[in-house]
Image (spheres, rainbow, N blue to C red):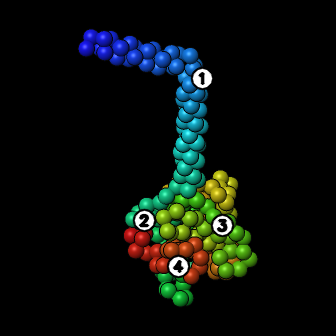
Amino acid sequence: MKVIHNVLTTIMMIFVTALVWGVISNPSQITEIDDELTVEVQEEAVMTKVRIAKIEALNEEADLNPIGRTDSWGWPTVGYRVTAFYRSSSHTGIDIANQRGTPVFASNIGTVVEMRRLTSGYGRYILIDHNNGYWTLYAHLQEFSSEIEIGSAVSRGQVIGYIGCTGTCTGPHLHFEIRRGCGEFRCHVDPWPYLR
Ligand SMILES: [Zn+2]
């Protein structure tokens, strides 16, 4: 029995020695693991960079496209002399009369998407996308503010232009429109409930 035990112990010892020696004598295995870890660390670093870049891009986009509240809209100029209310087909906004040069304010935070100088109709007008499903339009302006251009982010109450009588107009006033669902003419809604 003792002989068998000794033989088995010896076999075990040889086996364990061979195993340990195999690992020690084969450092390429360790190098491989090391390389894999290095690649993983490098990939992780790249992924982190990608994540940071994505977050920065999103932040930049948010700066360019500030999202306006849908439940709060500012009065778009100085004075409350409303000379024409909204009539779905014949008048697509409200008219607020005041002297030429009276400042016109962005009614909500948003992005300027159109600034045009028409000889009839709206005359000089600005269209703002509030990035919340609503757009506002400011027409018959005497001039645009020099502070804005297409793509400008505007804050609520920021001066965007001045009251005038450009386009089809009989006296200086601001024609103010709200468009819901799209920035096009066909999407106009009555601005009155939003301004109250
Ligand atoms: Zn009007």
Name the residue type under label 2.
Answer: Thr
Q: Mark 4 to mark 1: distance in Å?
A: 73 Å
Earlier in the chain: of badge 3 and badge 1, it is 1
Write down the residue under mark 3. Answer: 114
Within 10 Å of disc 1 (Cα), the crowding (few <14, some 14-19, many 20+) is few
Q: Position of residue 83 (x, y in %)?
A: 51, 79
Earlier in the chain: of badge 2 and badge 1, it is 1
Q: In this rendering, does residue 46 appear at all?
A: yes
Q: Mark 2 to mark 1: distance in Å?
A: 64 Å
| Mark 2 beta carbon near ligand 1 (under 8 Å) | no
Within 10 Å of disc 3 (Cα), the crowding (few <14, some 14-19, many 20+) is some
The residue at 63%/64% (across/down) is 113
Earlier in the chain: of badge 2 and badge 4, it is 2
Write down the residue under mark 1. Answer: 28
Instruction: Tell me the tag on residue 70.
Output: 2
Instruction: Tell me the tag on residue 188.
Output: 4
Name the residue type under label 4.
Answer: His
Name the residue type under label 3.
Answer: Glu
- The relative height of residue 58 versus residue 97 in the rendered view (above or below) is above
Numbered disc 3: secondary structure: strand
The residue at 68%/74% (across/down) is 123
Q: Position of residue 44 (x, y in %)?
A: 54, 36
Quadrant placement of the C terminus: bottom left
Where ligand 1 lies, by image quadrant? bottom right
The residue at 56%/82% (across/down) is 186
Q: In this rendering, does residue 173 appear at all?
A: no
Q: Position of residue 183 (x, y in %)?
A: 58, 72
